[in-house]
Amino acid sequence: MNRLSLLSLFMLSVLAGNALAKEEAVRSERKGKRVIRQEDIPFTIKCPGEYTLGEDINFDKVGAAITVSSNDVKLHLKTFSITTSTSGSVGILVTNPSGETVSEVTIQSDAISNSSESSIGSGILLLNTNKVLIDNVFIENYLNNLDIQNSSDVRVLNSQFLNGSSAGANVSGSTNVVFEGCVFNDNLNGINFNSASQDCSVFNCSFPNSGSTNLFAAEINGLIIENSTFSNTGDTNQSNLVQLGDTTNTAANNVIVRNSTFTNLSTTNTFPEGLDIQNGSGFLIESCVFLNNNVNQPFDSDLSGIHFGGAGASVFGVTVRNCVIQGPAIDGIYPDIGSSNGLVEHCVAAGSLKDGILANGTNNTTIQYNTAVSCGINGIALGQGSSSCAVLNNVSSGNGNDGIFIQGAIPQQFPASSENLVQFNATFSNGNFGIEDQGDNDRIFSNTAYNNTAGNYFVAANTPLNAPGDATTAGANLNA
């Protein structure tokens, strides 16, 4: 065979090999097995299967670097990263242009970051998705590092979200979104829950610092926060560490906060409250620790470790149980105007600048089996027209003013507190009275008061003490 024939055969074999390679590539694409490289970007995943990055990706256009529009997709970034550099761009978008739900998607590993001067856009954006797993990702410098909209059954595990100009993670109109083992640091808000989201959870997450609120649940029905830490390291403009509901007619309902720690001991940022509940119903705050510092704030701000209610608020059914509130917050636990049917029990409030437990303008709230010690003014106080409240079986000791104080009327401001029950409490070693009542028609009996500086009791003349109970004269049921 001559040299020309050999060359022809070689060329034919090369062409055949190329054809087979192309056919294999098409076959792999149909199977959904693809290594995504820079030359493929922007890339849309239209077929089920497994996809990986083959190198670091840079995206400098408007839109999404990678779009997932198919069901049953696993996208693994491996050790590579996606960097976007145009305002409004998205690292990974999961959506179907037809509006159908995209299901069974996994996104795993490594970093997505924005390098543009503008932080508009998202690292990962989920639109109308179901059964999505996001695991071990690091996202930074977007408007919302993770944006979950109109989606359900989303799990976010072992991931970090840094420096989001709006939120580390934004959850809008979504159901059953779970964050577990995640870190949210230096975002404006760590997590935002809004637009009627429901049945979401935050487990074992850390919120070291934020520009505003670590976790803000403006509108949600069903939220569990457990074994998480919320703290502030010095931003003087920061708002509350956690806020539930908003006075702009959005509510958080059926919320459990358990076994978590709220810390603001910064010497420069002394403004935030630990947990602020502004609107909604059905709250359980249990076995949490609050360490707050408000030393540089005006006393009349009444900032607190736990605050529910306030001007314009509507809060029903808050239970605070087995919590420790350590000053110097201005107040430890603060049921406020607009709140009702609250329960504060088995808590310790110590070292508050003003009152350990301050109930102002609240109705039908029970304060029982608590310990209030070493507070600047009162251990327990009812004020600003609080009514039908019960103060039962508490210990109030070593406070600067009264062990238990009930406020009278202040003309043109608010009526006297009234129809309250004070029973079975022990008040001792306080700087003024053990129990001081300036309210109307309160019932005070079967308490123990001793070793209080100004006297063990002071009861206003207009407060009858003859029913119920066997006391027929003011203070007769108090043990001197």
Image: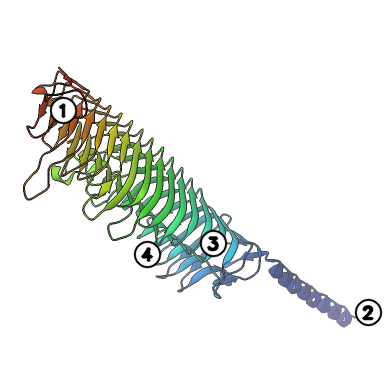
Which of the image's four quarters has the C terminus? Answer: top left
Q: From what the image shows, is residue 166 above or below residue 426?
A: below
Amino acid beneath label 2: Met
Q: Which mark is residue 466?
A: 1
In the image shown, does 346 or 355 lie closer to the viewer?
Answer: 346
Task: Determine the secondary structure under disc 1.
Answer: loop
- The answer to whether one can see residue 432 in this image is no
Q: Are marks 2 and 1 in contact (CB under 8 Å)?
A: no
Residue where numbered disc 4 is placed: 119
Pinpoint residue 342: horizontal percent, then vertical percent.
Answer: 30, 42
Task: Measuring from the top left, give residue 101's x and y in whole percent.
Answer: 56, 67
In screen coordinates, is 349 left or right of 37? Answer: left
Label 2 vs 1, first from the N-terminus: 2
What residue is at 12 percent from the left and 47 percent from the top? 414
Which residue in the structure is indicated by mark 2? 1
Kind of residue at disc 3: Asp
With respect to residue 53, does 281 lie above or below? above
Residues at discs 3 and 2 in contact (Cβ within 8 Å) = no
Mark 4 surroundings: few (<14), some (14-19) or many (≥20) residues within 10 A: many
Q: Mark 1 or 4, which is nearer the eye? A: 1
Report the residue at 43% width, 58% height from top. 197
Marks 1 and 4, how far apart at CA: 67 Å
Give the label, 3 or 2, closer to the camera.
Answer: 3
Label 4 and label 3: CA atoms lie apart by 20 Å
Which numbered disc flags the more N-terminal residue, 4 or 2? Answer: 2
Image side of residue 374 versus residue 245, left or right: left
Observer-nearest of 464 and 300: 464
Q: CA distance from mark 2 to mark 1?
A: 126 Å
